[in-house]
Amino acid sequence: MKLLLIGAGNMGAAMIPGLRDYDLTVVEGRAERREELAKRYPNISLRGDIPSLEGYVVILAIKPQSLENLSTQGEAEALVSILAGTPLSKLRERIVAKAYIRAMPNIAALKGKSVTSVTGDSSFKAQALEILSSIGKAIWLENEKQLDIATGLGGSAPAWLALVAEALADGAVNLGLPRSVSYEYLSGLMEGMGALLADEHPALLKDRVMSPGGTTAAGYLALEKGAVRDAFIEAMEAAYRRSEALGK
């Protein structure tokens, strides 16, 4: 399978380590970025212009606002777009392909740990899931509304979790723990929690950790007073509404 990755910004470049086992060509307009990528990935093909799409599965990783100015030739085997809020209808207007897929990976693709939302033409479902599983876990969703909702959970939430990690580290530093040690704890904590949540409901896990009158209960009370749960629920809605707006 020949892949053509158009755009090598933060998200596009994060996908390269997982995709490079394919016959991968990367299109990146900025010469300095191509030089940087050539040093990091000497075995991939890099070019500054978009070739004919014939025979390629195209992974579109440009900025959503750049779609209107994108010029392509030929019919792709399939188009896999990671453009936030850009509906399949708009992709069909701009690029000719045999099948259309929308996907929303996250920055953990750089470590092969992305959780990627996927939807689109069922004729290319199996191939899309195979390709996107190379950068982590790929989850097929039934429609675009579900993908727009999951954009907050899968695409934006890593930034929110980073905020949580930074805040916890700041709290530990405030009490006297070295910052480097705090971040070491948090790295292991996030990894361990992911493994636990794969097998256990979060509410049950919380109850197992929180013993009566203990340190966890005291901290949990402080979080409830700060309306942390409400803030995250509102963050999910804000991300969904923004994804809707981008689509319009």
Image (cartoon, rainbow, N blue to C red):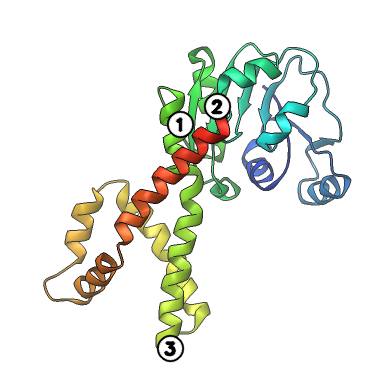
The answer for how far apart the CA atoms under marks 3 and 2 are is 46 Å
Q: Nearer the viewer, residue 59 or 147?
A: 147
Is 33 located above or below residue 145 in the figure? below
Local packing at callout 3 (Cα closer than 10 Å; few below 14, some 14-19, many 20+) is few
Residue at the outermost left position: 212
The kind of residue on which mark 1 rests is Leu
Q: Which mark is residue 147?
A: 1
The label nearer to you, 1 versus 3, is 1
Label 3 sits on residue: 176
Mark 1 vs 3: CB contact within 8 A: no
Local packing at callout 2 (Cα closer than 10 Å; few below 14, some 14-19, many 20+) is many
Mark 1 vs 2: CB contact within 8 A: yes
Q: Is residue 38 left or right of residue 174?
A: right
Q: Nearer the viewer, residue 215 or 25?
A: 215
The kind of residue on which mark 3 rests is Gly
Label 2 sits on residue: 102
* Residue at 24%, 68% in the rendered image: 220
